[in-house]
Amino acid sequence: MKRYPLKTIFTVVTLLCSSLFFAQEYSFKNYDWNEKETKVEIPEQYKNEKEVILERTTKIEIVVEGKTAKQYHLVHEKIFINSDDAIERNNKIYIPFSLDESVLINKARVILKNGSVIHLDKKDIKEDTDQERGIKYNYFAINGMEKGAVIEKIYVLQESPEFTGQTIKMQDDYPIANLNFELIYPNYLVFKTKSYNGLGEPVIDDKKIPNTAILALSEKNIPALDNDENYSNWNLQLKLFRYKLDENLMSGGRNLNNFKEFSTNLYERLNPELDKKVQKTLDDFCKTIPKSDDLQEQIWNIENKIKKTITYDRYIDNKETVANVIETKQANQTDILKIYLAVFKNFNIENNIVFTSNRYKIPFDKDFESFENLNELLFYFPSIKKYLTPTEVEYRIPLFPMTIANNNGLFIKEKTFAGVKMGIGEINFIEIPGNDISHDIMDITVDFTNDIENPLVTSNLSFGGYSGLNFQPIKDFASAEQYKTFLKNVAENYTVETEYKTLTTENDGTDFIGKKPFVLNVTYDGKDLTKKAGENYLFSVGETIGKQMEFYQENKRTLPVEIDYPHFYTRKIKIILPKGATVKNLDKFVMDFKTQINGKTEAAFISKYTKKGDEVLVENTEFYNIVNYPLNKFEDYKAVINAAADFNKIVIIVTK
């Protein structure tokens, strides 16, 4: 039996509490394209575009029949194809739903430039599998596509109504010539709405259909918003439209789907009174958790114990008590919260439950109480200001998924009123762990003394915080042979794919996540980095720091920068020369690039060198203190990013 997320369980919609309903068919049942249309007029301004959405019509209708409510969802699109890239991208029309869902209409056609029409039907639907994610998907396979063609598709689905909050994207990475959206519903319902990023406001028509309101929004000539810009948050910048059910005039329900009631109901559900038998099972479980006087370490021990002994599966059946969770070693979303809360209570650890969203998908708006913002879970510990993710097995406090940080969240805390404990919700900002946690340190020695043509390179590389998290869990989830191959692949990035002489690691495995950095120690011969040119030896010293990304931005930047997390790099390269040797190009190591915001340096790449006798010491620091950089600072930010790539290209000239 499928179990739904907590935000669905605690929906407080009172739609069906009255005996009076207006039963009806959905209004666009006979909606169709124009069968006689064999020529689509392309607006002059779009004739040279590679791809254009000429029309996008969306209709969502809520129909109440007896004691049930249904939702009908129509999408009608016309897409102008005018480039080889567009042909390749659209020769498969992906179907954004499962064929076993309630699909009422699903049709597509292609109108060619000469007026002929290619009709697609069920026999043209193919199935494919994303091997990497293990997901099957369906698509219409199109043959005979050409430049100047128009793809047209319509589908209608019957769904469960979404009253608690829905976001519709009104912009795309291609221009939209005409966009029309309608929300159709019984006129005794009142929806709260909000438009974002310059989108117009909707209008309501309650005259067109008896006892029905139509909330409509239309836009023309919506510009494309490039979805390929690196270091950005596309979904945050789009024109968006949000709606949620706010009132039911028939039942008298007001301020529906609010965070206050959600918090109260959730607290009651997750904090049941435990009988003696259940409490005994819990006490025995807690006795197996190592004790610590350091609060963060104690929380780490609790998290480690639960994640290593209880398997989380969002969709399994609820367990009756926390004792059943401990005994079966299985938990769904509700169960996992209950077990954490019960253990925290046993250890007397103050905490808040936090509900939030993925900032790259549905950004949390503190001024619009939408339950779709409550899809992700955290625990917050006020006394140490740290977070724990209860459902992601590879994380440990203070690390949690970066995609749900730098975002607002609903913090549910316990308060006592007149001797009664209850949950109170507050919206606060979720800080991401800073660059003091995600700190990478490189200590590299290049020794020419034994062989100037084949120097020995010794690299001690330390990866902290989120950087270390990329490596540490793998040891516990891979076979010994797989892990050996993984380390070899990692080492190749820092040895320029030459065979290493020695390779050792420290602090790998989940037992070190959030506690110590992952350390990689590698030695290798530098002959592949050395080229002889007459009496000189050219050594690619910059490549010893590993491959670096070079940031290109061919078109004018349109989106501000948003990175995953703050991070800091400290690098030292010691070059030991043979007695009497000379070295040139050291001036290339002097670099200073900074991004300043409000008078403060928030990103930088700074490099220098010193030479004493036969030793050269190169030192550089690179850091990104914040997550968001404004668009007007993009060129400065890009210069910092590219400085590391430029450093990577530095070659010194050594002469005996």
Image (cartoon, rainbow, N blue to C red):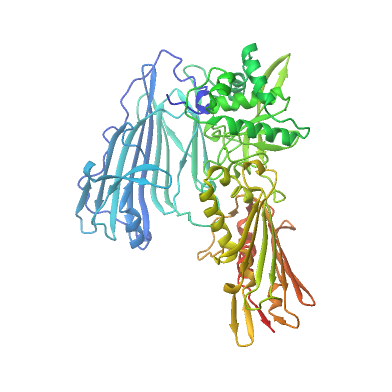
Q: Can residue 200 be seen in this view?
A: no
Residue 62: quarter of image: top left
Q: Is residue 117 visible?
A: yes
Compare residues 494 and 389 and report the one nearer the observer: 494
Indicate the position of residue 122 as horizontal and vertical percent values. 23, 41
Disc tally is 0
Quadrant holding the C terminus: bottom right
Quick check: 348 left or right of 651? right
Quadrant holding the N terminus: top left
Indicate the position of residue 434 as horizontal and vertical percent values. 70, 48
Residue found 29% across the figure and 59% down from its top = 148
**139, above or below 87, in the image:** above
Indicate the position of residue 449 as horizontal and vertical percent values. 71, 76
**275, above or below 644, in the image:** above
Residue found 54% across the figure and 28% down from its top = 333
Quick check: 185 left or right of 454? left
Residue found 45% across the figure and 54% down from its top = 223
Residue 414: quarter of image: top right
Compare residues 356 and 532 and report the one nearer the observer: 532
**51, above or below 351, in the image:** below
Quick check: 280 left or right of 221? right
Indicate the position of residue 524 as horizontal and vertical percent values. 62, 66
Residue found 33% across the figure and 58% down from its top = 88
The single residue placed furthest to the right in the displayed view is: 612
Compare residues 474 and 358 and report the one nearer the observer: 474
Quick check: 60 left or right of 417? left
The single residue placed furthest to the bottom in the displayed view is: 534
